Every structure is written in C-alpha cells, then in structure tokens.
Image: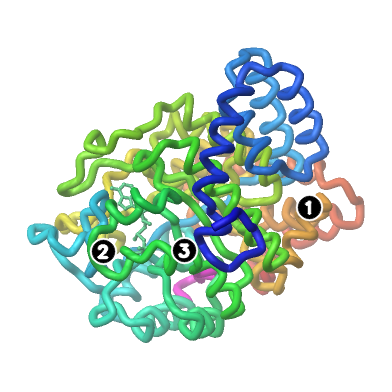
Amino acid sequence: MNYDPHSMHAEAFINDEEIQETLAYADKNKENDELIGEILEKARKRKGLSHRDASVLLSCTIPERNEEIYALAEQIKKDFYGNRIVLFAPLYLSNYCVNGCVYCPYHAKNKHICRKKLTQEEIRKEVIALQDMGHKRLALETGEDPVNNPIEYVLESIKTIYSIKHKNGAIRRVNVNIAATTVENYRKLKAAGIGTYILFQETYHKKSYEQLHPTGPKHNYDYHTEAMDRAMEGGIDDVGCGVLFGLERYRYEFAGLLMHAEHLEAVHGVGPHTISVPRVKHADDIDPSAFDNGIDDDTFAKIVACIRIAVPYTGMIISTRENQKCRERVLKLGISQISGGSRTSVGGYAEPEEEENSEQFDVADTRTLDEVVHWLMDLGYIPSFCTACYREGRTGDRFMSLCKSGQIQNCCHPNALMTLKEYLMDYAQPDTRRVGEALIQRELENIPKETVRNIARERLAAIEHGDRDFRF
Ligand code: SAM
C-alpha cells in the first residue's frame, strides 16, 4: 500500500515504507548543516513541520543546531501556551482486562495482581478525595473487558463524576482513556460530555504491535490505529495521541506519531488535541529492561522538543511516570499539561493506605498536588485548573484555529489566574497560598489588553469574596 495521509486505512496513513525511507533520509542528513538550517527556518514560521523534516531535526548531531532546536521549542512553547501548565489526575475505574499486552500488568494472564472495579459509591469517594486535593480535570482509565467494564459502566461512571459537588469542588472535565471502540460508543461518550478521548498507539510498527499484543481485541492493529477516525466520526473532536516509548525504536515511533497527526489534519481538519509521551515503567510483573528500545533522558528531551516544533498547537502531556527532574526539564521544552498527586491503583485516592497491588505502573513523582503546584510556581509557571474551552464549546477546529492564531492567550491567561485563585483559597497550604497570591498579582500585569486585565481584576476580587459562579 502506498503512503496516503488522506486514506482511511491504517497501513496507508501509517505507511511502513514511508517511515523506513524517512529514517534513511534523516540518517543521511543528520549532519547536513544547510538542510537543517532550512528546516529550522521553516519551523520558525510556527506552522509545524512534516514528519520528514521533523525526523531530520530529531536525528541532527550538530551540537550548535541542537541548541537552536531546544531554543526554538522553548520559544514556540511560550508563544502558544505562555507560562501556564494545566493540571489533571488519572482515575482508575477498573483493572479487569482481557488483553495480553506484554508491557502492562493488567494483562489477562496476570493472576496475582488484585483485580478491582469501583462501584458508583466507591467512585464517589474517589472523586471527593480528588476534589479535596483541588483537582478539576480527570483522565478516566480502565482495562478492556466487555463484561466487567462495558461502555454502560463507563457512561454511568462519567455521570456520577460530573454529579458530585463537594464543598466548592467539581470535576469540570472528564477525559477518557479507554480501549478502541465503535463509532456508536464514541457517540455515547460524546453525549456523556467527555473532554478528550485519549488512546495511545503504544507502537506504530505493525509487526511489533502484533507481537506486543498477542491476544485479545487489542491485537488488531488496524482497528486500534483507525480508532481516532471512528472517534471523530462519532463527534469527538478532541483526541489525544501518544506512543509508549521503549517498545520500538524511538525514531520510528516519532515519524509514525507525526504521520498520524498529519492524517487527522488531512481528513478531519483537526490534528491531535494532545500528544502524550509515556515511557515503559516498572510495574507488578513488568520489568522495563526486558524491552530493547528504552530511551535515556537526553533522547526523551529531544523528542519532546521536536514534537513541540513539529506540531506547535498540540497540548503535550507528561505523567507521574517521570520523576521531578525529568519533568522539570521537559516542561520548558514543550509540555503543557501534567498530572499531580496521582495514584495508578484502583481506589487509591480514597484509601491510599489500603493500596493492594492493583497499580498500573510505579509512580516516579510521588509529591502531593500542593507540592507540585508550589514547585511549578517556584519555576515561574502558572498552575492552571481551567477547563473553560471545553465548557464554552471551544473544541476541535474552534480551539485549534484560536490556538494557531495565538489568540488563546488573551482568555487562557486570566482564566488560569482565576482558577489558581480558587485553588489557593480552597485547598492550598499556607505557604503555597502566599507564593500564589504574589504570583497572581505579578501575572495580572502581563495580560496584554487593558479591558481584559480589568475584568480579570474584578473577577479575582469576586472570587476572594466567595463568588463561585464563573465558568472556567
Ligand atoms: N486499556 C486502555 C487501552 O488499551 O488503551 C486504556 C489504557 S491504559 C489504562 C493506559 C496506558 O498506560 C496504556 O495505553 C499504556 O500506554 C500505558 N502503560 C501500560 N503499561 C505501562 C507500563 N508498564 N509503564 C508505563 N505505561 C504503561
């Protein structure tokens, strides 16, 4: 099959031959200073890069050019996302799973992991615990199991989550990371009010994919790879892509990921709302060193920088799989969303002490959400709990066109400050609050338009006096 980003067939839009040629081209040109200079010139226009051009940057071995790549990634990050970092937490509903993914401890043959599925009452407790930490945005996670975790269970759980109003808390955006499913089910998820539908490709390499997913419905590469098209057909216009780094050669994955983004743009007019960059981690019966393609922190940072340059508008997510030091480095280079205070076990928020071995992977950043918020502010970032775009219907191409025009700054910046204000008043430790209030005062001055600045000032004062009727 030939490479065709407009095709609806996985093997045409993620075309192995095209990836192999791209890798050979990138390797041949990794020291081609003139070509790399031209690609960087193109990248400075902030319209993104093709998978070929971006692959050359990823392979580049000229130290001065690599410095330029990092500096450009940092600048693009600032231009599109300012200094805001959006916070979220994963919520594991069930670890029942019928698949055989060899890197995941939820695989069906694992008989000693504790299998759990939350009841609606248990979900309530988890959500209250998450609200008490200050979270407003969740990513729902489940294993794939049509009997234990049917779509009806996921839909009922979403309804429960949105219905819980505890003190000043509320979960305002539920993103969903569940296995590839049908157009009809995506339609139901859309109707339930989900934010982003997230699905990691794990690997774009078909043969490796089939070996890494030897059994269960996830074995079907085409069905999995074409899931985002079905999600979009079902009306979900914010989709989140990602690969699990460590399974295949990272250059292959990088090219595949960008081709997937090109395909979504070509067919649906909207690229991925987010791109995640997880790396395989130790978990119950999983040893990451068993996979040959692990990447070091320097390579990881380069990947983040090159994705940021190649897809400037996309949100980029890093989870607590990574430690504080690694997170700090890549925040600068392109990450716009991070999780904080995460538990990867089923029921781990309400009853952390009783945590049985139901985790999906070991968490490397074990700090509380408040510590993460404090740390972000010390680094000069604005921790944001904003969900306004989604709540105001700015999703899909409406979000993308605003983001691409750089306009999003005028509403995101003040909204971030207001949601931070809510957090500081309701949940922060005294020192976090002190640092945060000072930051808000400083950052108010950075709102470019005077009218917007004045409205923000008024709203911050209203929040201070207990008014919580704003829609963020
Ligand atoms: N079951 C759904 C699916 O198949 O897409 C939901 C995904 S699972 C709960 C979330 C993600 O965790 C997976 O897509 C995978 O990339 C990642 N994951 C699995 N095992 C992991 C491990 N050992 N280390 C790091 N991430 C892992």
Is residue 168 visible in the rendered image? The answer is no
Q: Type of residue at label 1?
A: Lys
Decide which of 40, 32 is in the foreground and name it: 32
Q: Position of residue 255 (x, y in %)?
A: 55, 42
> Position of 407 compared to 226: left or right?
right
Residue at the outermost left position: 112
Task: Return the residue at label 3.
Answer: 138
Q: Position of residue 454 (x, y in %)?
A: 86, 56
Q: Residue at x 69, y 43 (%)?
A: 50
Do residues under tags 2 and 1 come within 8 Å of each other at their CB atoms? no
Q: Which residues are magenta?
A: 165-174
Q: CA distance from mark 2 to mark 3?
A: 14 Å
Q: Is residue 271 above or below residue 312?
A: below
Q: Secondary structure at mark 2?
A: loop
Image quadrant of residue 367?
Answer: top left
Looking at the rendered structure, the number of numbered marks drawn on it comes to: 3
Residue at the outermost front position: 1
Q: N-terminal of the two: label 2 or label 3?
A: 3
Task: Return the residue at label 2.
Answer: 346
